[in-house]
Amino acid sequence: MIARIKGIQRNFALHHRSDLIKLDRKLRKELEIILHQEELIWFQRSREEWITSGDCNTSFYHTSTTIRKNTAKIQSLRTKDGLWITDERLFVDHIRNFFMSLYEDGHQPAASDILNEQFLSLTEQEWLQVSQPFKLEEIKLAVFEMNPCKALGYDGYTAGFY
């Protein structure tokens, strides 16, 4: 296909004819369609390969994860006071303090409970909140927040199907 287009362009440089222009346009459109189809095939093959091989520790998956990790770094954090933190040491302190304050609300189990392998139970109010049926809006929101082309679900369909 590309060789034919090059030949037409060579002839067109020597002889300026309208039929060559029409043929060139037609072949370029066909080439564009073919290239688009080939791109779709390669996309589907890559998805199929990932699905069949799983998330194996191949160099491809390792490299893509490393690239993603390097581009997804947090550059700054905003405190409750609205101040921006950019220093890495201050990041660590801020995150540590956040989680320490998060778990200081009195719900921490006593050391004796952990040693005796006793688990905390929910209060009646917490149980009522947890056991409420899902609302249709919550389900719809969860489904629409999923990436439509990511990994298959247990039924073999991607989120885009739903």
Image: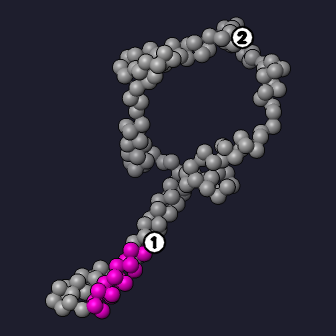
Q: Amino acid at mark 1?
A: Gln
Closer to us: 101 or 83: 83
Q: Residue at x 41, y 21 (%)?
A: 84
| Relative image position of residue 88 (x, y in whole percent) | 37, 21
The amino acid at mark 2 is Asp
Picture quadrant of residue 128: top right
**Residue occupying the point 40% across, 16% down:** 90
Q: Going by the picture, which residue comes out furthest to the left?
A: 14
- The answer to whether residue 96 is visible is no
Residue 27 included in the magenta stretch of the image:
yes
- Image point (21%, 87%), residue name: 12
* Percent of width and height locating residue 54: 53, 51
In the rendered image, the vertical position of residue 26 relative to residue 53, given as above or below: below
| Label total for image | 2
Left or right: residue 1 versus residue 80 is left
Left or right of 131: which side holds 86? left
Residue at 77% x, 29% y is: 130
The foreground one among 48 and 12 is 12
Q: Secondary structure at mark 2?
A: helix
Real-space CA distance between mark 1 and mark 2, rounded to the nearest whole angstrom: 62 Å
Residue ID for mark 2: 113
Q: Which residues are magenta?
A: 18-33
Main secondary-structure element of the magenta-colored stretch: helix
137 lies above or below 111: below
Label 2 near label 1: C-beta < 8 Å? no
The numbered mark, 1 or 2, whose residue comes first in the sequence reads: 1
Residue linked to disc 1: 37
Find residue 157 and report its image quarter.
Answer: bottom right
Q: Nearer the viewer, mark 1 or mark 2?
A: 1
